[in-house]
Amino acid sequence: MGRYARTLGALGRRLVQMASVVVGIAVINFFLLHLAPGDAVQVLAGEAGSATPESIAALRAQFGLDQPLAVQFAKYLASVLTLDLGFSFRQGMPVASLILGRIGPTLLLMGTSVGFAVLVGGALGFAAARHAGRPLDTAISILALLFYATPVFWIGVMLIVVFSVWLDWLPVGGMAQVEAGLIGLAYAGDVARHLVLPALTLGLYYLAVYARLTRAAMLEAYGQDYVRTAVAKGVRPRRIARRHVLRNALLPVVTQLGLQLGSILGGAVLVETVFAWPGLGRLAFEALFQRDLNLLLGILLCSSVVVVLANLAVDLLYRVLDPRTARS
């Protein structure tokens, strides 16, 4: 009972911290966005071309932009605490509905990219550490350095040129062929084909990071006393590498994964724009240019919640890999 009580207590404290972080992020986002010049009314007036000062004032009053900033902030904070993300006057829909329609593709893209980067990058780092100083280690290190140093947008463009334009193997962009009317497994296969290039583009950089990190962590673990003891006992090298070295080398990888979740979500904005992927990143890009502050605030808040929850999952995974942390 004591162990479960400690676990529940730690989880409760972490949830309170998460809620505080999300509210703090919401406050910072509100003031940062309102410091930027322009709003949705100015964009609408510019598109209309003949908007009068009276019509602009009426739109500001309708959107609540004529009120003092403190009043707008108080209303926004009250809405956030009641889980009301507001209304997008630019799109003519509730912000929550717009986000729910786009968050699935973003999570699919992020999950696929992270899974690919961790699994393939970890395998490459494992192979490089097992053959340290040999040609395979050199080849993997050069490949990882190449992916690490190459800009993400350039990788995306080159993948499009090679696999979509030259070879015509994969679609250029989008999430599925809407006009094909596919359902079931056929639709899932079509989505998978459209997912390959965006996931590769976003995942190759992080593949390089996890390959280099896994290699360095394994080489450090090989110098520890428990590994030398296992070698002295005659344990087979493969078993030492898998059961003793790799398990401890995964700890910094998991830590780095938790730290990079925010940057992965930020990279999804660029990738979704390049490949016309209908996710939160592309929606945020459109909202930014349209000065749709309600929608942009909702997207940023939802993104922060996703990152915070993902970090909680990473912490739980860390406790599984290293049970000693469960005592703290």
Image (tube, grey):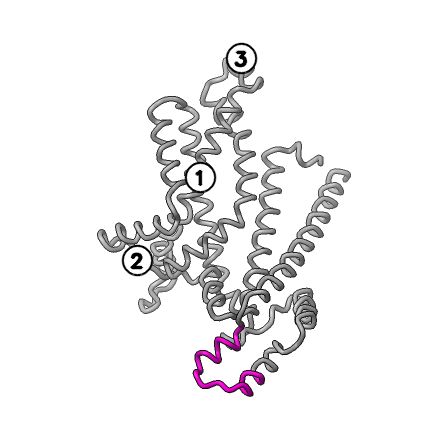
Seen in the picture, residue 266 relative to 180 is either above or below; the reply is above
Image spot of residue 198 (x, y percent): 38, 53
Q: Quadrant of the N terminus?
A: top right
- For marks 3 and 1, give the CA distance: 30 Å
The numbered dot on residue 171 is 2
Q: Which of marks 3 and 2 is in front?
A: 2
Q: What residue type is labelled 2?
A: Pro
Tell me which segment is drawn in magenta: 39-58
Image spot of residue 292 (x, y percent): 52, 70
- Quarter of the rendering containing residue 255: top right
Residue at the disc numbered 1 = 119
- Quarter of the rendering containing residue 24: bottom right
Among numbered discs 3 and 1, the one appearing first in the sequence:
1
Residue occupying the point 47% across, 57% down: 106
Whether tag 3 and tag 2 are in contact, CB under 8 A, the answer is no
Taking the magenta stretch, the answer to whether it contains residue 56 is: yes
Residue nearest the observer in this picture, 25 or 86? 25
Seen in the picture, residue 69 relative to 124 is either above or below; the reply is below
Please name the predominant secondary structure of the magenta segment in the image: helix
Residue at the disc numbered 3 = 233
